[in-house]
Image (cartoon, grey):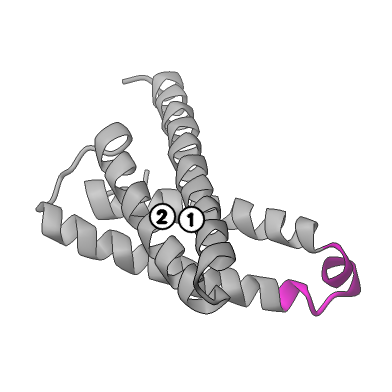
Amino acid sequence: MSRRDRLRELVRLKLRFALTSALATAVDYGLYLLLVYTWLEPVPSHVISYSVAVLVNFSLQKRFIFTLERKLSHAFVLAMAVSGGGLVLGTLLIWVLTQHPFFDHYQYVTKLCVTGILFFYNFYMKRYAFERRFL
């Protein structure tokens, strides 16, 4: 496979990854809002919606993006560890960025930056979880 073909394939995978991630994010926000406005407090609503979104994301990525090169149970555990790491990394990045007055004032910019960083973190770490490779 030529370098150009490899680059095209990588871009295609990232676009598909972005679409599945967007769907999982919509599930997370939609379920969160449904739960918080109907019968649960924000913290348990977040735990439930985030957990469901992670499972939706795993299923979509397994089916449409990555080729499974490990046992399914092993890939699942690794993907869940990546998601947990992403939660910790995102929280840390938001905390660090909000120490700066600009990012503290413009939270939508902060969240956008963190989401962009986590997109690449999740892509490469989950690619490793599924396919045993980063590139």
Residue 60 in the figure: left or right of residue 44? left
Pick out the residue farthest to the front.
Answer: 38
Q: Position of residue 70 (x, y in %)?
A: 13, 51
Whole-percent x, y for residue 1 in the image: 31, 20
- Badges 2 and 1: C-beta atoms under 8 Å apart? yes
Q: Is residue 99 above or below residue 49?
A: below
> Magenta part of the protein: which range?
96-106
Q: Nearer the viewer, residue 80 or 4?
A: 80
Number of residue marks: 2
Instruction: Name the amino acid, label 1.
Output: Leu
Relative to 88, 79 lies left or right:
left
Determine whether, in the image, residue 131 is placed left or right of residue 103: left
Residue linked to disc 2: 53
Q: Residue furthest left?
A: 71
Identify which residue is drawn at 44% across, 63% down. 50
What whole-number distance in Å separates the C-alpha atoms at marks 2 and 1? Answer: 9 Å
Where 82 falls versus 112 (above or below)? below
* Rendered-image quadrant of the C terminus: top left
Residue wearing tag 1: 31
